[in-house]
Amino acid sequence: MNAPVRSVVVHLALACAALVGVIAIGWVLADSLVMPRIARSGWPVVLVPDLSGLSQADATKKLTDMGLDPVVDAERRKADRVGPDMVALQLPIPGDSVKKGHVVRMWLSAGHTTVPVPDLSGQDSAEAAIHVQEAGLQISDLDWMTSGKVPAGKVIRTDPMFGTLLNRGGTVRLILSSGTDPDSDSARQDTAKSASPASGPRTF
């Protein structure tokens, strides 16, 4: 191949390479700039609302009214600032722009994962049961001790002791006073009538 022919072939190859580069750049620009505008013009865009602290029903209705698709994840999230069963996390985050019909995933709060054992000293079994339930715990058993200071049928202490952190749903054992007479069964019988579960931990 003589020099003039070789020069023509080289120039043609360079021209083809330049053309391919221009086409590639044009494709990228069209994909990143033109197509999104076309898509947005044909499909309305909305801002994702803030769902934090809403119940599942309220959050679902809010998203549905905006034309978004709510999905609740089965996993619960710890969120000390959000009550149980309220929205603790969402994706996309509030303020994001999405097309109508876009999925918004929500995670509900498990609430506080640990709670302290309440102070039940001096309470009868019925009072103690209410406060244990309100704390998110359960009574596992009732034990008895003689006491000259605590009236019969009243709580002397708990096991674990007052203030101990337990996982929500954990159990507490009550130690009740049988009075000064270790052989007296009257307080035990009265307490058993008001605080005897059918089965399992005593939830009252």
Image: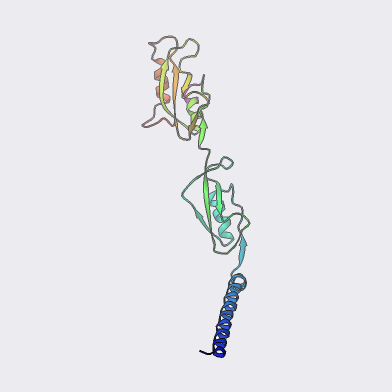
Report the label total. Answer: 0
Residue range in magenta is 122-127
Looking at the image, the residue that sits furthest to the left is 199
**Would you say 43 lies left or right of 74 here?**
right
Spot occupied by residue 20 in the image (x, y as percentages of width and height):
56, 79
x 39%, y 19%: residue: 189
Tell me where residue 61 sits by quadrant: bottom right
Spot occupied by residue 34 in the image (x, y as percentages of width and height):
62, 73
Spot occupied by residue 174 in the image (x, y as percentages of width and height):
44, 23
Q: Nearer the viewer, residue 157 or 160?
A: 160
x 53%, y 38%: residue: 112
Looking at the image, the residue that sits furthest to the front is 2
Q: With respect to residue 30, does 105 lie above or below?
A: above
Q: Is residue 134 visible?
A: no
Q: Is residue 7 visible?
A: yes
Tell me where residue 190 sits by quadrant: top left
Spot occupied by residue 140 in the image (x, y as percentages of width and height):
41, 28
